[in-house]
Image (tube, rainbow, N blue to C red):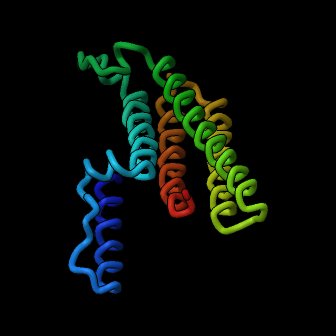
Amino acid sequence: NAGFYAHAKATALALDAGAAGAASATVNTSVLGCLKGDMKCLLSSSFFAVFGIVIALMKDVPDAKGDARFNIRSFTVRIGEKKVFTTMRRLLTGLFFGVGAGFTRGAFSSIQASSSLNAVTICRMIVAVSSFGAGVSVRQEAKSVDAEDSGMVYKYYMHLWKIFYASYLVLPFAR
């Protein structure tokens, strides 16, 4: 995510520099430079990093019985299927509600600053509503899942992947 962001920023700067007749853009567009110097890059990368951790750990839950049988001491085997499932569900729900609250606050701040509804405010509202909706979906889908039933957990895991890709579709609206 950070690499993509740095590349997109470098491309945009090169286009701007070419249009303005400048020799080169002087902004650091390396991945680390992007993470250190650009809050949007850091926040979006952090969001998808946390989501990636949730997906990685949730993938192990359906495999716990097989891992235990073959003496593979995975995180899920050591901690327990229910605990990993519940913790990851709570982490992802909190992540979405936190993002939704942040973008709601940002939308109201931009309304107060400009005294009108503008494109930035609308984009922030789209991200906020999408985030709250995803958070509710994560919670609701998990209610009927038995963490020790591999089939149910796998179905939930695939639901998380749908939300993951939907999050990338909403990303351009994050302003």
Residue 24 x, y percent position in the rendering: 22, 74
**Relative height, residue 69 to residue 95 (above, below):** above
Q: How many numbered marks does the figure carry?
A: 0
**Nearest to the observer: residue 138 or residue 32:** 32
- 141 left or right of 47 in image: right
**Nearest to the observer: residue 42 or residue 170:** 42
Q: Residue at x 63, y 48 (%)?
A: 103
Give the quarter of the image for residue 112: bottom right
Q: Residue at x 49, y 28 (%)?
A: 88
- 123 left or right of 111 in image: left
Q: Residue at x 68, y 36 (%)?
A: 140
**Nearest to the observer: residue 43 or residue 110:** 110
Residue 146 x, y percent position in the rendering: 57, 25
**Relative height, residue 8 to residue 80 (above, below):** below
Residue 117 x, y percent position in the rendering: 75, 65
**Visible in this render: residue 134?**
no
**Nearest to the observer: residue 69 or residue 59:** 59
**Which quadrant is home to the C terminus?**
bottom right
Residue 113 x, y percent position in the rendering: 71, 56
